[in-house]
Image (cartoon, rainbow, N blue to C red):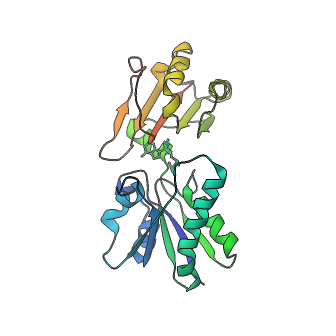
């Protein structure tokens, strides 16, 4: 029975893939990934391009950046219907995912939809390097140590969520936060945390930008591909 494989390909540097992930990718006949926008290659496709082989069939799938649940479900259904005929013919499909496959990944929705349409299809995932880990590494800092508590906020809807996180964690990671950046900056200033906050845009990609000193950076226009690490306390115990 054919399988849908989900391979984590890391955050940008093609060498951040695991040996197991690379083997799976190179043995694949059909390689799927989220399609890019405006006719450009998607991020995952760009990351795996050094590893792709000419005989492989490439299957870009549309995962739009929208919030509407109904439209999203329809897009996942279309993506699942695209890979399903190959799987049902007995051909494996390998989906390449930017960062880690189980960490806020489009693969989750694709795999669920495929199994809903055909429960006989098996799914296997290969873990990898997710963006908070890559960002800590590029900053040259440990993400957490000893008994420090870590909170990851994947999207901020209200600033109060961040204030609450400061009360219960020593380290806070923000993802998908760029549209709220100026309000976050104000809060960090009020809490005297600007000296302990760091941002990386497009971590491990050739266009990577590191912001270690945020005091003069109230008006940054950040890319969607940005992660902020806030060291709320430097105490380890
Ligand atoms: C849909 S989530 C995908 C997460 C991804 N699966 C991972 O393992 O990191 C997209 C968010 O991840 C973060 N992200 C992913 N790759 C990044 C990178 N190379 N540099 C900075 N942030 C990144 C950003 O916060 C972005 O808004």
Name the quadrant containing residue 233: top right
Name above or below for residue 155 compared with residue 45: above
Q: Residue at x 69, y 70 (%)?
A: 116
Name the quadrant containing residue 121: bottom right
Q: Residue at x 45, y 20 (%)?
A: 195
x, y percent for residue 109: 61, 60
Q: Nearer the viewer, residue 209 or 178?
A: 178
x, y percent for residue 31: 44, 71
Q: Nearer the viewer, residue 176 or 228?
A: 176
Q: Is residue 58 left or right of residue 153?
A: left
Q: Residue at x 63, y 48 (%)?
A: 68
Q: Would residue 5 be visible to someone looking at this image?
A: yes
Q: Nearer the viewer, residue 196 or 183?
A: 183
x, y percent for residue 201: 40, 38
x, y percent for residue 141: 44, 35
Task: Locate the N terminus by quadrant.
Answer: bottom right
Numbered-mark total: 0
């Amino acid at each position: 029975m054919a399988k849908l494989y989900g391979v984590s390909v890391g955050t940008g540097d093609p060498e951040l893939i695991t040996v197991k992930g690379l083997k799976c990718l190179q043995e694949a006949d059909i390689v799927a990934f989220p399609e890019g926008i405006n006719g450009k290659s998607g991020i995952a496709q760009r990351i795996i391009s050094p590893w792709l082989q000419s005989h492989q069939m490439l299957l870009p799938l549309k995962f739009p950046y929208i919030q509407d649940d109904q439209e999203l479900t329809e897009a996942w259904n279309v993506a699942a219907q695209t890979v399903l005929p190959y799987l049902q013919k007995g051909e494996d499909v390998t989906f390449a995912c930017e960062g880690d496959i189980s960490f806020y990944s489009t693969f989750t929705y694709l795999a669920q939809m495929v199994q809903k349409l055909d429960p006989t299809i098996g799914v296997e995932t290969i873990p990898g390097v997710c963006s908070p880990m890559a960002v800590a590494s590029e900053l040259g800092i440990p993400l957490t140590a000893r008994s420090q508590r870590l909170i990851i906020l994947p999207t901020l809807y209200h600033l109060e969520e961040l204030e609450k996180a400061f009360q219960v964690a020593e380290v806070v990671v923000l993802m998908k936060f760029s549209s709220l950046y100026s309000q976050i900056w104000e809060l960090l200033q009020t809490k005297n945390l600007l000296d302990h906050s760091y941002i990386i845009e497009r971590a491990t990609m050739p266009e990577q930008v590191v912001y270690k000193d945020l005091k003069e950076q109230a008006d940054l226009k950040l890319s969607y591909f940005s992660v902020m690490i806030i060291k709320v306390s430097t105490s380890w115990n």
